Image (cartoon, rainbow, N blue to C red):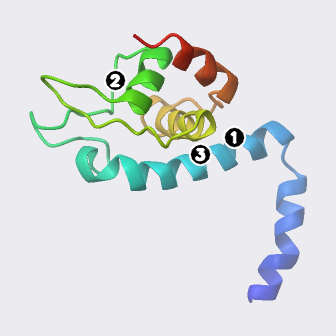
Amino acid sequence: MKYLLLLITPFFFSCQSKEEITQQQYSVEGMALYKTHCENCHQADGSGLRDLYPSIQQTKLSPEALACLLKNGKKGNGFMPANAKLQALDIAELMTYMREKWGGKKQIYPADSVKIALLNCR
């Protein structure tokens, strides 16, 4: 069965465009990053924990603000730790996953856009 799957996989991907494959890769990597960096507080379904950790299912943050929040965190009321080790590609993958999961958008959030957003964080 394992070998059959290996033989069939190239045919499955050959029917998809490069953009579709890249979007799927970003989403899968983003899901893994979400599980590692976000799920403990915001829960697997993004619902958060009441007033302690907000729901991210219907965030109103702009993509630029979200990129800055994921990288730098937030201090004060509504503390969120920084994720200084996350690179622009990691954040792009996280945002792609989150937009697909809770925003209904199957669209890559480009790493170049994250880099620009991170340069302009306040």
* Nearer the observer, 113 or 76: 76
**Mark 1, residue position:** 23
Residue type, numbered disc 1: Gln
Q: Secondary structure at mark 1?
A: helix
Q: Nearer the viewer, residue 81 or 40?
A: 81
Among the two numbered marks 1 and 2 on one chain, the one whose residue lies closer to the N terminus: 1
Q: Is residue 39 visible?
A: yes
Instruction: Decide: few, some or many residues near mark 1? Use Cα within 10 Å; few <14, some 14-19, many ≥20.
Output: many
For image coordinates 68% across by 49% down, the residue present is 25
The image shows residue 62, relative to residue 1, as above or below, that is above
User: Which residue is under mark 3?
Assistant: 27
Query: Mark 1 to mark 2: distance in Å?
Result: 21 Å
Give whichever of 15, 108 is nearer the camera: 108
Q: Residue at x 90, y 54 (%)?
A: 14
Q: Is residue 68 left or right of residue 57?
A: right
- Whole-number angstrom distance, CA of label 2 to CA of label 3: 18 Å
Q: Label 3 amino acid?
A: Ser
User: From this viewpoint, which residue is outermost toward the front?
Assistant: 84
Displayed quadrant of residue 122: top left
Q: Which residue is mark 2?
A: 59
Q: Secondary structure at mark 3?
A: helix
Labelled pair 3, 1 in contact (Cβ < 8 Å)? yes
The part of the image, by quadrant, that contains residue 113 is: top right
Q: Residue 82: percent from the left, percent from the top?
A: 35, 35
- For image coordinates 64% across by 30% down, the residue present is 107
Mark 3 Cα-neighbour bin, 10 Å: few <14, some 14–19, many ≥20: many
Residue 70 percent coordinates (x, y):
41, 32
- Is any part of residue 44 visible from this angle? no
Work out which quarter of the rendered image holds the N terminus and state it. Answer: bottom right
Q: Quadrant of residue 27?
A: top right
